[in-house]
Image: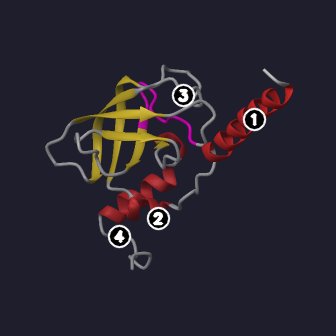
Amino acid sequence: MSPRLRWAVAFTLLMALLVERAWACSCTALSICELVDKADVIFLGEVIQGGLEPGEDAWSGRPQSATLRIIEAYKGLRPDVREVTVSLQYLPGMCSPAVYRRGEQTLAFLGRPEADRKLHDGACSGSRFAKDVADELQYVRAYFAGQTPNDHQR
């Protein structure tokens, strides 16, 4: 391989790596009002299967799915749904941690289910460990109980 071709290949790989890293963390943080407004599915659930192991780093990118027992369903789930499985698509180094840890509660903000009716979460997720967002959880509860102003909706 010629030195010029070798340089071109190395440069291309470097650019691809830089673009991938820039893309990986180009998420826009949404306010709780925006999350409530934009999410198609919102619920509080406890991870009962899959997800992160207790104590596992939330940035590992390892879990591929999590099954949650529904504690409180706010939007997008039928009233009779007691458990859901969420397909997780987190990669190491993404800007959102995987917030599905077995035995812990997750406040989930998900998009519309795919054509296969499966729920998905991952990069740029608005979902959070419930223990870390007591104020946001209180806002969600108040919002769906009709106790918050609706001025953010247009």
The label on residue 147 is: 4
Tag nearer the camera, 3 or 4: 3
What residue is shown at x 55% (from left), y 21% (from top)?
55
Residue, disc 2 = 34
Report x, y in % for residue 72.
29, 46
The label on residue 63 is: none
Residue, disc 1 = 14
Question: What's the CA distance linking mark 3 and mark 4?
Answer: 37 Å
Name the N-terminal-most of marks 1 and 2. Answer: 1
The label on residue 61 is: 3
Find out whether residue 104 is within the magenta segment: yes
Query: Is 127 situated above or below 35?
Result: above
Query: Is 58 situated above or below 75?
Result: above
Q: Amino acid at mark 4?
A: Gln
Tag nearer the camera, 1 or 2: 1
Q: Main secondary structure of the magenta part?
A: loop
Q: Amino acid at mark 2?
A: Glu
Name the N-terminal-most of marks 3 and 4. Answer: 3
Q: Secondary structure at mark 3?
A: loop
Q: Secondary structure at mark 4?
A: loop
Q: Over which residues does the magenta segment extend?
A: 96-105
What residue is shown at x 54% (from left), y 28% (from top)?
61
What residue is shown at x 50% (from left), y 34% (from top)?
90
Residue that sits furthest to the left in the current view: 80
Q: Secondary structure at mark 2?
A: helix
Report x, y in % for residue 147.
35, 70
Tag nearer the camera, 1 or 3: 1
Question: What's the CA distance linking mark 2 and mark 3?
Answer: 26 Å
Which of the pair 129/30 is nearer the observer? 30
